[in-house]
Structure formats: C-alpha cells, structure tokens
Amino acid sequence: MKQTAEGLTIRTGHNTREALERNRVLKLFFARQGLRLDDVWRETPGDPEIENRQLLELSRWVCVYGACPDRAKLEDMGYLYPPVDPDVNPDADWVRFERWMQGLPLTWTLPDHLSTSEDLHEVDDAEAGRRLEEVTAYLAERNVVVDFVEGVPARPALEYLLKTTREQPFDYTDELTVTHLMGCTGCCEQCFQEPWCEMARDSYWSGGVSAGREGFCG
C-alpha cells in the first residue's frame, strides 16, 4: 500500500472553521484507507486543533508503515512509539498498530465451547472445576492470569469469568504484557468473592454487610 502525506500537511491556526475543515479532511483520509479511527484514537470534543495534530501524526505513521511495513526498519528511522490509544507500552502499542493497519481484530474473547454458561446450574461441582481449569488454562496461554482469592469455589469463579469475558473482550498484546483478573472492584458488598475474602472480612464496610447493616462502596 503506497501512500504519501501529500495534501495532508496542516498548519496550526486559530480559525475554527479552517480547523474543522482540516479535521474533516484528515478523518476522510483514514476512511479511504479502510481504517477505523475509533480503534486507535479518541476524540477531543471542542478542540479540533488538538485532534488535527494527533490525526496528522497518525496519518504520518500510516503513510510510512504503508511504504515500509517493518517495525525494525521503522524504529531505525526513528519511529519508536506508535501514536495509538490506549497507550500501554511500546511493544503492546506496536501490536495494536500493526494489527489495525493489517485489518486484523484488535480484541479476542473466549471461543464458544468455553464461554457457554447456559448449563452451569445443571453441572456438578467436579464438572464446574474441570471447566474452570479449562478456561483459566486458555486465558493463561494468552497472558491473562486469574488472581481470585484463595478458597473461592469453582462454580462462582467460573460464573464470574464467563460473565466478565462476555462483557469485556481482551486486547491483543505483546508476549510480555500480562493482564490480571482479580475480580475485585473495591466494593466488597457487591463482590462475588466477599464470603471467602479475608480482606473483606476485616474491612469496615464488609463488617457492615455481614451484620446486616448498610455497607459502603466508595
């Protein structure tokens, strides 16, 4: 894919109408490449000048990568940190940027045979434990570590995992970036681990819940 930045050079100015027009042209550039901006960039409502600077930089990366889709060579040329959002770390950002440029998915979820929860109420504890091991092993292979508190039974742990992975897909990242699933939001009275969590038992708000008093979620 050969692209040049011709016609995309933008001078920063204070004319809002001009800035909005530049903004439209830049966004059109990505649309014509078949690239979804929302996957790697976040808007700054009310400030087209900031958006234009960000979009111009991203368009420069698109053009350079299109001419030389090789990370090592681009880094030798000074292209070290892809301007993507979210900004995690250089390696993870490169994974996101290159997958985006190649039209590949940026997120992943559990496959159907692992993610089904329709029959959980029908399986015994042993089967729930087996399925939990299968799910955690699949996640671990993809650098997602399950860090629930010790003693949580297999069934509630599995139910939480399946619900979480359905609602929040995981980003593709580099091999060294690890995602930890702790299942803790800091709101003990709403946490599925509360009955087995020593920290929750020792906390003021969990004590309130256990005693039937009003709990606290900050």
Image: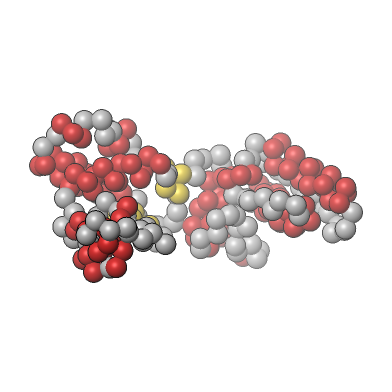
Residue reaching furthest front? 213
Image coordinates of residue 97 in percent, x first then y, are 57, 51
Q: Is residue 60 visible?
A: no
The residue at the point 22 percent across, 59 percent down is: 210
Residue 187: quadrant of the picture: bottom left
Residue 144 x %, y %: 34, 54
Residue positioned 30% across, 46% down in the render? 161
Give the percent coordinates (x, y) of residue 100.
56, 45
Residue 190 x %, y %: 32, 52
Color style of the picture:
secondary structure
Q: Nearer the viewer, residue 67 or 90?
A: 90
Residue in front for this viewpoint, 96 or 51: 51
Q: Nearer the viewer, residue 217 or 142?
A: 217
Q: Residue at x 65, y 65 (%)?
A: 78
Residue 149 appears left or right of 168: left
Q: Is residue 105 visible?
A: yes
Q: Is residue 139 above or below residue 115?
A: below
- Image check: 117 left or right of 49? left
